[in-house]
Image (tube, rainbow, N blue to C red):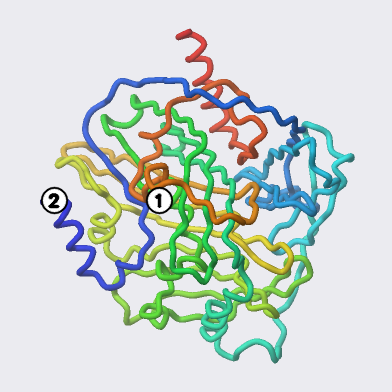
Amino acid sequence: MKKNLIKKSMLDLRHYRRILLLAIVLSVGIPIQNYAFQDVMAQNEEYTSYKGEIVDSETNKPLVFASLTLVGTNISTVTNTEGGFLLKVPANTESTTLEVSFLGYRSKTVPLSSLTQEKNRIGLDVLVTELPEVNISVPREAVNLVKETLRKKGENYLQDPSVMTAFYRETIKKRRRNVSLSEAVVSIFKTPYTSSRRDAVQMFKSRKSTDYSKLDTLVLKLQGGPFNALYVDVMKYPEYIFSEESIDDYDFRFDRSTRINDRLIYVISFNQKDNILDPLYRGELFIDVEKKVLTSAIYSLNITDRDKASRLFVRKKPRNADVYPVEVAYRVDYREKNGRWYYGYSNALLEFKINWDKKLFNSVYSMTCEMAVTDWEKNSDLSEPRYRDRLKSTMILSDEASGFSDPDFWGEYNIIEPEKSIESAIKKIQRQLRKQG
């Protein structure tokens, strides 16, 4: 009955129907923590690991979510929120060059032979570009450029079915302390961008840990797993933000310009119109002027009504607690190969407060998830996982994953280098496991 009421309230909100959901499940009780080991397939392929950081060459400021790609291959990774990277290069690759790129900076190619396995530091130079006064290829109105970009996705984005290997991580923090961590390597069966068919996801490996002693007697779970990141792919799933019905509810304006690989990129700012009362989004779109390609999007939800947002994002909660989001933000980056663009990286953040009855202080939690495509190939035989082997969009990764194992768990698979706080949490977990053994 309660589930049906939630569903009805969502259908009654015209604008809310299009909002990408990060659903939280909260329940009372502290389950017994179970560190189970997952059997891992033996990795036969040899590889070389390179670790380091990407920084601004002048200020030494870490560059967050910079892309690293092996030239001539589909192998890539991204830097973490501290600018750190970990790249694993298979021994059989013929590529000898690494390309590093970041929005607003000049891309750099680096010979693999110049890298060491640890402590590499690569600096990128800033590109400063003023917005041209006249450009005949750009519509006068920013909204028309956005609509044209959406229309031209068939010309600019992958049109062949593909199988992508991706690394996914989700974390839950109580203020700044990690209390839950789940990671997975998944296969994404990507359908063409003009197809209405949804992408299928299959799990290959996963691991998790949760320190329930820090969760205020709550079990916090993020519903949707990798789909929370996958559906941020604006060009594949525009209905979640710019549907045909809702795109005219926004004001778009030209903001500034920058460059990616010497391509002129217009930055378009958008926000919901003043007469729209239901919460929509605000953010920035980065569009290639010549090709009409969305290269990145960064946006967040306008939380205009705390109670409505709570009903959307919280699936279950204790009766003696008021739970509501204070920030919901998203980012998606695309990569290009041979003139076609494809989904490369995305993340989502949900920060919320829990006000307890008869308690003086509230609890602040943040839930984040991110996914990076680390390799892909054309799905020539149109293979797809069996229905029972596919992940459901309602899945909860922390329920599917089985536990943490040894440091070589991921083998040759590229992962997003963990932040120092996450890395220390992993080491702590491994020490606990050794003590239990």
Q: What's the amino acid at mark 2?
A: Lys
Compared to residue 359, the image places residue 374 above or below, namely below
Q: Residue at x 34, y 63 (%)?
A: 303
Please give the residue where the numbered disc 1 appears in the rendered image: 350
Rendering quarter of residue 43: top right
Question: Depth check: 234 or 66 in front?
Answer: 234
Question: Depth check: 428 or 389 in front?
Answer: 389
Q: Residue at x 49, y 75 (%)?
A: 270
> Crowding at label 2, few (<14), some or many (≥20) Cα neighbours within 10 Å?
few
Judged from the image, the secondary structure of the residue bearing numbered disc 1 is strand
Tally the numbered discs: 2
Q: Residue at x 32, y 31 (%)?
A: 215
The numbered dot on residue 123 is none
Left/right of residue 54 with respect to residue 23 in the rendered view: right
Q: Nearer the viewer, mark 2 or mark 1?
A: 2
> Crowding at label 1, few (<14), some or many (≥20) Cα neighbours within 10 Å?
many
Q: Position of residue 182 (x, y in %)?
A: 46, 35
Q: Position of residue 264 (x, y in %)?
A: 72, 75
Judged from the image, the secondary structure of the residue bearing numbered disc 2 is helix
Rendering quarter of residue 342: bottom right
Left/right of residue 277 with respect to residue 161 in the rendered view: left
Q: Residue at x 19, y 63 (%)?
A: 9
Of callouts 2 and 1, the N-terminal one? 2
Compared to residue 294, the image places residue 307 above or below, namely above
Q: Position of residue 315 (x, y in %)?
A: 25, 48
Rendering quarter of residue 29: top left
The numbered dot on residue 2 is 2
Left/right of residue 345 with respect to residue 230 in the rendered view: right
Compared to residue 266, the image places residue 432 above or below, namely above
Q: Position of residue 34 (x, y in %)?
A: 37, 20
